[in-house]
Amino acid sequence: MSDAAVVVVLGASTEAGRNFLVRTADRAVRVIAVSRHDPQRLDPHVTWLRHDLECGPADVRAGTLVSLGPLAHALSQVEESSGLGRVIALSSASTRFKKGSSDRAERRRMLALEECEAALAAACRERSIVLTLLKPTMIYGGADANVSRMAGLLARLPVVPVAGHGLRAPVHADDLAKLIVHCVISGSDSAGSWFLAGGETLSYPDLLRRIAAADGRRIRLLRLPAWLLKFVLRGIRLFGRLPDIQPVMIERQGMDLVVDDTPARERLAWNPRPFRPG
């Protein structure tokens, strides 16, 4: 099989990565899956390469690179690889929402991500590589770091405080995998940068209710002003609780974290499912 028919996948152990491997099982491609972790399942068309990309790019040859982990790894892989003709990389719509964040560290991360996007685009142009950059809103499905974390928190709280009614449009990891397969097949027709939203838009309180309902529970919501909820959070964090919940997250409860994905729907046949956690 020629290098052109080989797809190397970075971040193959992510939820989107696992779904991509399933969706390519009946395709005429060979997949080299790169991950720090051992595979949960073995597929005949997949060769697993256990490698930590923090130590450098993977030593592989392929015609297509699918990057589902940190974007910096995709950039390193492009800079050190030969024979690539296609790159499909996952970034984030958060560059639109968080670059004006009140959290300095978060602003720095968004600036670094934007700079990495620009560097990847430049590296692909220099090498005549067709680049597709996907920028979804919140990703969920399986053991994700978004909805699954919320579900765990909701299960521990008798009353759930909320500070806003901002809109959310979560994207399922399998819908991303389906789109990536489409982009691999469509080639240069999918070139460009694409914002992606899920198939349903909900307010933040309705999002919480839907997550709880997926576990067979109903929750009681308590509306509080953001300043008061942040004050309570600071007190809780003094006792070492909820260390991963930042005050800026409370501020965002009142923000609309949605994007217009009409271009992707019209040109990439993007047709995501409604929000169905669990």
Image: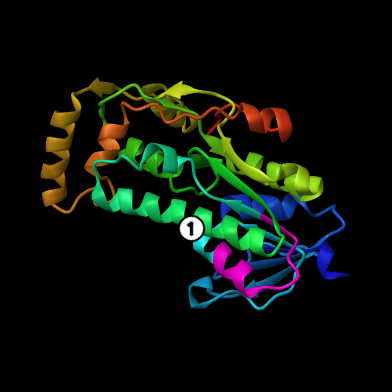
**Residue drawn at (72%, 32%) of the image:** 267
Compared with 259, 61 (above or below) is below
Where residue 50 appears, as percent x and y from the top left, is 60, 75
Under circle 1, the secondary element is helix
Asked if residue 238 lies left or right of residue 73, the reply is left
The verdict on residue 78 being magenta is yes
The kind of residue on which mark 1 rests is: Cys
Q: Is 11 placed above or below 231 here? A: below
Q: How is the image coloured?
A: rainbow
* Residue 42 as seen in the image, left or right of residue 195: right
Residue 13 visible to the viewer: no
In the depicted view, which residue is nearer to us: 124 or 113?
A: 124
Residue 118's spot in the image, x, y percent? 52, 54
Residue 61 sits in which quadrant? Answer: bottom right
Which segment is the magenta one? 74-87
> Residue 164: x, y in percent?
29, 24
Query: Is residue 176 placed above or below 8 in the rendered structure?
Result: above
Does the image show residue 212?
yes
User: Which is nearer the eye, 139 or 92?
Assistant: 92
Q: Is residue 128 left or right of residue 220?
A: right
Which of these two is toward me, 48 or 28?
28
Query: Which residue is under mark 1?
Result: 116
